[in-house]
Amino acid sequence: MRGILILVLLLLVSCQNMAPSAVDQPAGVIRDLHSGQRLSAQALVERLAGAPRLIVGEQHDNPGHHHAQLWLLQALAQRRTQGSVLLEMLTPDQQARVDEIHALDTARWPADLPTALAWQSGWDWSLYGPIVRYALAQPYPLLAANLDSTDIRRMYKQAPAVSGARSNAPAVRIELLAQIRESHCGLLPESRMPAMLAVQQQRDRQMAAQLLAAPAPALLFAGAYHARLDIGVPLHVQDLGEHSAPVVVMLAEKGAVVTSASADYVWYTTARPVQDYCAQMRQ
């Protein structure tokens, strides 16, 4: 009897650690922002399959966006051999842990995978877990794209600038500063804005460098502002010497305004009730 119980427990742990099975195709409206053409999800995948570098922008707290990301990963796998996947949510000091688990058979994964990965609590594991589990079970590497917290603190104090004409264009800096003010609900003193801008751009530069160094075809999942063609990682990719910008797919809620200046394709998902995060910050 004791042997049967142990076997059942082992099977439960194994099932918990298994990569997710194929997910249903997400709903929503997809458009080619350059032509205005509406696309099916399958048509989008066919167009993306040839991209050596692809960025998918997300709203971090939208479950539908993470569903679409996992579906895209699985759908692309049917059309090409993936070279690598990069996450804004992973930092270099986690990479050794990621590599160690990636080298294991899924049946040998730790029962508490988030702890084993030193997953940061600011990223909701219930949303990112299925993507991470799927990527860890694949033959290609799962790579950290962000900066370590120690680097961010150092950069915040020193406020270094990035090099490059595109990322230093006045319009880019103005737009990023406006985004920083909005995301912090207008509560940041103006004296802190240069440092915040420097950190934002250094994170974009890090993601660009990691994307360029990653085995191709490479796919980066990042927040919408990091993903944007006009202010984010793609500018830094070009400032680092790459002739062409990565292809950008923006996941956005229905009603949002997304133009060809910021993305190549948009996938509109169902709009959710508005969360007043500023009210929480002001408390």
Image (cartoon, rainbow, N blue to C red):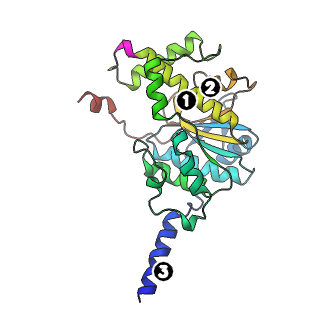
Q: Which mark is residue 229?
A: 2
Query: Is 146 contained in the magenta span?
Result: no
The residue indicated by pointer 3 is 7
Task: Please report the bounds of the magenta region as a residue range.
Answer: 188-192
Task: Kindly identify the amino acid type of the residue bearing the numbered disc 1.
Answer: His
User: First in sequence: mark 3 or mark 2?
Assistant: 3
1 and 3 marks in contact (CB < 8 Å): no
Question: SS class of the residue under badge 3?
Answer: helix
**Depth check, front residue: 80 or 99:** 99
Q: Is residue 66 visible?
A: yes
Q: Give left or right: position of 119 versus 52.
A: left
Give the percent coordinates (x, y) of residue 117. 49, 51
Give the percent coordinates (x, y) of residue 128. 49, 49
Residue that extends furthest to the left in the rendered view of this protein: 283
The residue indicated by pointer 1 is 226
Magenta part, dominant SS: helix
User: Nearer the observer, disc 2 or disc 1?
Assistant: 1
Gap between marks 2 and 1 measured at Cα:
9 Å
Determine whether 147 is above or below 166 in the image.
below
**Depth check, front residue: 234 or 47:** 234
